[in-house]
C-alpha cells in the first residue's frame, strides 16, 4: 500500500551500464526523454532494449550510472515505489483475476478511492468495457494487449514503458493498434517509452526515436531527421536502405562540398557532410535516384555508365539493381507512376539525384 | 467451478461427436478396472455392512438381515477413534502444509541449481517402504533412541519420559509420511507460475508480501488443494502410524477397522466403519473444495 511520491519531469539516464557476468548488455548509455513525449527505442534483437527498459522499471539494477525522473533519483528505488508502469511483451495479465480486477490491481495496491470509476473509464478508452468480467484466458491476443495497456495506463504513471507490445499481433491489427496507442498517448499525456525492432512502427508513432546498437545509442532524433540525415552506416541501413559510394572531398565551393566519387564529380550542401576527414562514404537512398536513358537531359548529380542487372516489381514501386562501371551494384526504387523509362535487364542507364538528398559519412565508418 | 479451478483453469473444451466415441474407447480399460477392483468390492462391503452373526455363532459366519442399525452401533461404539482420526489427520495436514509450502517455495523460486537435487531429496523416502520408515522413527524416538537420551541428558525431559506412545509421535509420523504428497503438488503449481507475473505485480505497486498474497498464493492454490487432499484423505484412514508410534489411547479409526477385520473377525462392524469413514471423508472433501475453489478468486 505504498503511494509513490508525486514524481514528475523528464526521464534522465546518465552513463548507465549493465553487465551480465562478462557481457555488457548496455554500455555507458545516456539519454534524456522529455516529459509527455512519445519516445521509441529502436534496435536489432539483443541490442539491450529490454535491459534498458527493465532498469527504468526497476526490475534490474544498473551496474553503474544513474536514473532519475525530474530531480528524483530512482536508480535503486524498488519497482513498486516507482511512478513507472510497464506493458510487458508477454502482457503478463494475472490469469486468476478478472479483467476488471487486473486493471484495478495497481489502484487497489495504492489504496485509491474510486477504483470502479477509474477502471470503467480506462476500459472505455480501450473499448473493452463489456469484457470486464472475463478472465484473461478468454480474450484474444489483441484484446489482452489492450487490457495490458489499460492496466498500466489507469495508474497515470509519470512514465509508461512498452516492451514490443505489438510484437504478437498480426500486421493489420498491429497498424490499427499503433494508431490507437498514439491516440491514447495524446489523450492521457503520459510519457511513453516504446521499445520495438520494427522501424516503421517507431517512425510512425514516435516524436523521438533512439536507434540502439550493441548497448549504445547510435543516433537520436525525429523520425524524419534519422531517415534523411543518418549519422552512421548502421542507422542508414537500419532505417530503410541506403547506397554507399566511396569518395573524397576535392574542394568546397561556397556552401557546397565538391567531391569525387569513383571518377565522377558531385556536389552537396556542406550541412549534409558528417565526415571529419576528406575520405567519404557518400550515401544516397534508393528512392532518391532517378533513372534515365543515356543521353537524356539530367540535372543534379549524375552518374553515367550504369547497366540494369535486375528488375523486381514490388507493387507501389519497382526495384532496379544497377551495376556501375566500378562494379558496384546500386539499388534504385522508381515509383510505378509512368515517370521512369521502360527498361529491361541489360539496358544501359544514367542515374541522377538532387544534391540535397546526399548524406556523407566518414570514409572509415562501418 | 471448484473442480475446474483445481484441474484446468483455462481449458474450455468443446467435445465433438467423433472424438467422444474415441474418448469412450480410451476410457474403457480404466472403467473396467474400476468396475472389477473398486465397484465390486464396494458392493460386497455394502452387503457385509448390514449382516448379523449367523445363528450358529460360528466365527466368521454372518447372514444378511439388512440391519442398518449396524452403522449407528459402529459409530457410537467407536466415536472416540473417529474424532481422533480426523483431528490427527487435520493436525498432520496443517503441519505438513506449514512445512511443505516454504519448502516448495524455496525449491521453485530460490533453489537455482539445487532445484533438482532438492526434488530428489523430497522423493527419496519413497525408495524405502512406508512401514520400514515408520519403524525407523519408532527406533529414533524410542526410549533407547538418540532423541530421548539427548533430551534427557540436557535435562529437557524427565528420565522416565517418552516420545513414542504419545499423540505427538503419531501426528509427527503422519506428517512425516505424507509430507511428499503435500510438497510435490505445491511445488508443481509454484514452479509453473510465470515469473513475469510476479514482476508485473511489483510493477503495479505490490511489495513482496502483497505479491505473495495476491498473486503467488492464489496461483498456487490448486497445488495446496491437491496436497491437502492427498495428505488428509490417507492420513485419516491410516493405522500404521498409530500402531507403531502410538499406544491404544492414540488409536485411530483405521486401527479399529483393522482389528475388527483381522483380529475380532467382526466383518459387519468393520464394513460399516469403512463406509462411515468414506462418507465422512467425501463430505469433508466436497465442502473443502467448494470453499477453497471460490474463496481464493478474490
Ligand atoms: N539475465 C541475463 N543474463 C545474461 N545475459 C543477459 C541477461 N538478460 C539479457 N542478457 C543479454 O543482454 C543482451 C541484451 O538483451 P535484451 O533483452 O536487452 O535485448 P533486446 O534488445 O531487448 O532484444 P530483443 O529485440 O530480441 O528483445 C542480449 O545479448 C542478452 O543475451
Ligand atoms: Mg527485448
Image: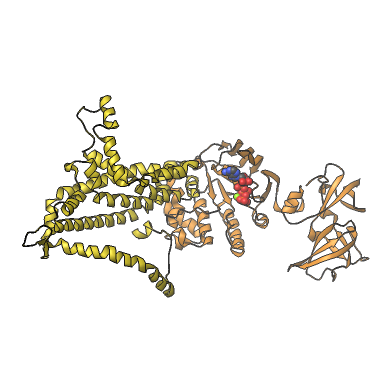
Chain colours: A orange, B yellow
Percent position (x, y) of residue A185?
A: 58, 53
Q: Residue at x 23, y 42 (%)?
A: B244
In the displayed structure image, the side of residue B134 where residue A27 appears, left or right: right
**Number of callouts in the render?**
0
Q: Residue at x 49, y 59 (%)?
A: A124
Q: Residue at x 75, y 52 (%)?
A: A236
- Up/down of A11 relative to A200, above or below: above
Q: Name which quarter of the figure residue B55 lies in.
A: bottom left
Percent position (x, y) of residue A69?
A: 58, 40
Q: Is residue A52 visible?
A: no
Q: Is residue A295 visible?
A: yes
Percent position (x, y) of residue A311?
A: 80, 67
Q: Quadrant of the N terminus of chain A?
A: top left
Residue at the outermost bottom position:
B17
Residue at the outermost top position:
B154
- Up/down of A240 relative to A210, above or below: below
In the displayed structure image, the side of residue A154 where residue A49 appears, left or right: right
Percent position (x, y) of residue A119?
A: 46, 55
Of B246 and B18, which appears nearest the observer? B246
Residue at the outermost left position:
B55
Of B172 and A25, which appears nearest the observer? B172
Amino acid at each position: 500500500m505504498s503511494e509513490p511520491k508525486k514524481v514528475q519531469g523528464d526521464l534522465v539516464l546518465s552513463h548507465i551500464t549493465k553487465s551480465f557476468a562478462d557481457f555488457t548488455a548496455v554500455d555507458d548509455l545516456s539519454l534524456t526523454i522529455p516529459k509527455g513525449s512519445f519516445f521509441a527505442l529502436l534496435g536489432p534483437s539483443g541490442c539491450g532494449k529490454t535491459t534498458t527498459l527493465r532498469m527504468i522499471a526497476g526490475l534490474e539494477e544498473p551496474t553503474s550510472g544513474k536514473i532519475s525522473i525530474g530531480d528524483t533519483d530512482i536508480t535503486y528505488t524498488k519497482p513498486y515505489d516507482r511512478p513507472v508502469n510497464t506493458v510487458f511483451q508477454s502482457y503478463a495479465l494475472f490469469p486468476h483475476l478478472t479483467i476488471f480486477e487486473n486493471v484495478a490491481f495497481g489502484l487497489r495496491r495504492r489504496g485509491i478511492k474510486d477504483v470502479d470509476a477509474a477502471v470503467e473509464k480506462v476500459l472505455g478508452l480501450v473499448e473493452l468495457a463489456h469484457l470486464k468480467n472475463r478472465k484473461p484466458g478468454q480474450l484474444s491476443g489483441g484484446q489482452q494487449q489492450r487490457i495490458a495497456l489499460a492496466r498500466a495506463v489507469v495508474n497515470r504513471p509519470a512514465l509508461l514503458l512498452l516492451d514490443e507490445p505489438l510484437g504478437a499481433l498480426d500486421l493489420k491489427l498491429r497498424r490499427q493498434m499503433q494508431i490507437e496507442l498514439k491516440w491514447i498517448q495524446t489523450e492521457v499525456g503520459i510519457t511513453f517509452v516504446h521499445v520495438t525492432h520494427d522501424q516503421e512502427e517507431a517512425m510512425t508513432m514516435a516524436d523521438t526515436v533512439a536507434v540502439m546498437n550493441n548497448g549504445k545509442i547510435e543516433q537520436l532524433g525525429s523520425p524524419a531527421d534519422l531517415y534523411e540525415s543518418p549519422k552512421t552506416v548502421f542507422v542508414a541501413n537500419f532505417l530503410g536502405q541506403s547506397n554507399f559510394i566511396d569518395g573524397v572531398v576535392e574542394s568546397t565551393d561556397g556552401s557546397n562540398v565538391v567531391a569525387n566519387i569513383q571518377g565522377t564529380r558531385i556536389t552537396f550542401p556542406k550541412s549534409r557532410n558528417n565526415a571529419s576527414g576528406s575520405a567519404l562514404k557518400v550515401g544516397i537512398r534508393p528512392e532518391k535516384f532517378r533513372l534515365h536513358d543515356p543521353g537524356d537531359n539530367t540535372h543534379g548529380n549524375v552518374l553515367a555508365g550504369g547497366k540494369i542487372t535486375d528488375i523486381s516489381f514490388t507493387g507501389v514501386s519497382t526495384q532496379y539493381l544497377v551495376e556501375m562501371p566500378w562494379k558496384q551494384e546500386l539499388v534504385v526504387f522508381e515509383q510505378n507512376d509512368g515517370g521512369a523509362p521502360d527498361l529491361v535487364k541489360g539496358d544501359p542507364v544514367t542515374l541522377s539525384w538532387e544534391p540535397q538528398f546526399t548524406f556523407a559519412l566518414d570514409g572509415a565508418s562501418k | 467451478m471448484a473442480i475446474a479451478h483445481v484441474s484446468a483453469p483455462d481449458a474450455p473444451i468443446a467435445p465433438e461427436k467423433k472424438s467422444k466415441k474415441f474418448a469412450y474407447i480410451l476410457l474403457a480399460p480404466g472403467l473396467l478396472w474400476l468396475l472389477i477392483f473398486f465397484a465390486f468390492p464396494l458392493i460386497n462391503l455394502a452387503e457385509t455392512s448390514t449382516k448379523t452373526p449367523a445363528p450358529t455363532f460360528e466365527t466368521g459366519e454372518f447372514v444378511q438381515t439388512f440391519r442398518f442399525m449396524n452403522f449407528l452401533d459402529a459409530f457410537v461404539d467407536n466415536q472416540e477413534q473417529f474424532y481422533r482420526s480426523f483431528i490427527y489427520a487435520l493436525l498432520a495436514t496443517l503441519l505438513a502444509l506449514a512445512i511443505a509450502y516454504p519448502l516448495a517455495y524455496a525449491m521453485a523460486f530460490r533453489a537455482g541449481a539445487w532445484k533438482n537435487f532438492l526434488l530428489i531429496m523430497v522423493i527419496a523416502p519413497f525408495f524405502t517402504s512406508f512401514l520400514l520408515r515408520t519403524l525407523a522413527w519408532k527406533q529414533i524416538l524410542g526410549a533407547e533412541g538418540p532423541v530421548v537420551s539427548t533430551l534427557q541428558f540436557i535435562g529437557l525431559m524427565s528420565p522416565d519420559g517418552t516420545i513414542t506412545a504419545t499423540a505427538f509421535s503419531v501426528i509427527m509420523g503422519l506428517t512425516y509420511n505424507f509430507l511428499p504428497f503435500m510438497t510435490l503438488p505445491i511445488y508443481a503449481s509454484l514452479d509453473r507460475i510465470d515469473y513475469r507475473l510476479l514482476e508485473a505485480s511489483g510493477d503495479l505497486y505490490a511489495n513482496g508480501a502483497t505479491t505473495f498474497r495476491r498473486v503467488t498464493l492464489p496461483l498456487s492454490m490448486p497445488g495446496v488443494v491437491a496436497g491437502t487432499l492427498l495428505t488428509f484423505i490417507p492420513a485419516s484412514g491410516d493405522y500404521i502410524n498409530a500402531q507403531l508410534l502410538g499406544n491404544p489411547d492414540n488409536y485411530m479409526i483405521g486401527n479399529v477397522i483393522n482389528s475388527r477385520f483381522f483380529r475380532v473377525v467382526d466383518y459387519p462392524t468393520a464394513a460399516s466403519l469403512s463406509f462411515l469413514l468414506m462418507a465422512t471423508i467425501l463430505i469433508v472433501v466436497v465442502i473443502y473444495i467448494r470453499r477453497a475453489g471460490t474463496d481464493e478468486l478474490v
